[in-house]
Amino acid sequence: MTDCLSYFSKSLAKINPNKLFVIPSWIPKLSDPEVQFNLDPPTYQQITNVIRKMKSSGSPCPLDQLSIISFKHCPYLRTYLTELIHDIWLSGTVPTEWKRACTILIHKKGNNNDPSNFRPITLESIPLKVFTSCLRNAVYSFLASNIFVEHNIQKGFTPNLSGTLEHTAQMADIINKARIRQRSVVITLLDLTQPHPI
């Protein structure tokens, strides 16, 4: 266990040791927003929509053992969660309990004694997942309404848009045109070991 803790502590610390993000000079500055950020807390309906979209098969966090299924089937719990999120949203302070998570290691391949052969999966509490989903939706709404997201480039996490399907269709079209015109085409697929910065 000590080897695992040491390995993941070192590998995660390398990514961004100061936890600072410096905007690169090549990123163009955004114009002032025409639509201001909506600071209103999420409504009961918005929270219900977030809960309905969450997978029922997800594992509950061992720290609180709350299952998403409970929130899907119990309007009273959703009402209580809405009031709780409303208070947290307005206070601007996330409860310490919500900041805790449980990380489990999933064996990928190879030697069981080598920590690099495991993939960490972090289980967060359902209330935190709902809260952060509402926050993500508010941020995305702000970005989309001000046309700060370029949908021809950014596909990931865009509502009602499957970037994978679109990119696959574009690649198939490129290959087909190259075949018809008897041209060569080079396709490079990148497999990033840690695609999501922490």
Image: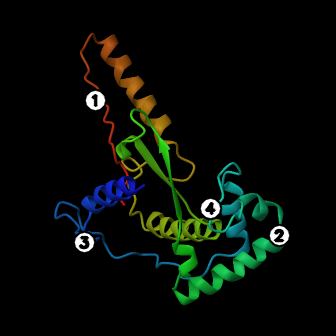
Q: Mark 4 points at which residue?
A: 61
Q: Name the residue under label 1.
A: 188
* Quadrant of the frame with the C terminus: bottom left
Q: What residue type is labelled 2?
A: Pro
Measured in 3D between alpha carbons, the distance from the residue under mark 2 to the one under mark 4, in whole angstroms, is 21 Å
Measured in 3D between alpha carbons, the distance from the residue under mark 3 to the one under mark 2, in whole angstroms, is 42 Å
Residue 128 pos. (x, y %) = 59, 70
Disc 3 element: loop
Measured in 3D between alpha carbons, the distance from the residue under mark 3 to the one under mark 1, in whole angstroms, is 33 Å
Q: Which of marks 4 and 1 is nearer the N terminus?
A: 4
Q: Which amino acid does label 1 sit on?
A: Thr
Give neighbour class at mark 4: few <14, some 14-19, many 20+ (Cα, 10 Å).
Answer: some
Q: What residue type is labelled 4?
A: Cys
Q: Name the residue under label 2.
A: 75
Between label 4 and label 1, give the one nearer the viewer.
4
Q: In this view, does 124 lie to the left or right of 49?
A: left
Measured in 3D between alpha carbons, the distance from the residue under mark 4 to the one under mark 1, in whole angstroms, is 38 Å
Q: Determine the residue positioned at 66% across, 68% down.
A: 64
Q: Can residue 197 be seen in this view?
A: no
Which residue is nearer to you in this view: 77 or 121?
Answer: 121
Q: Earlier in the sequence, mark 3 or mark 1?
A: 3
Which residue is nearer to you in this view: 130 or 124?
Answer: 124
Disc 2 element: helix
Residue 152 pos. (x, y %) = 39, 47
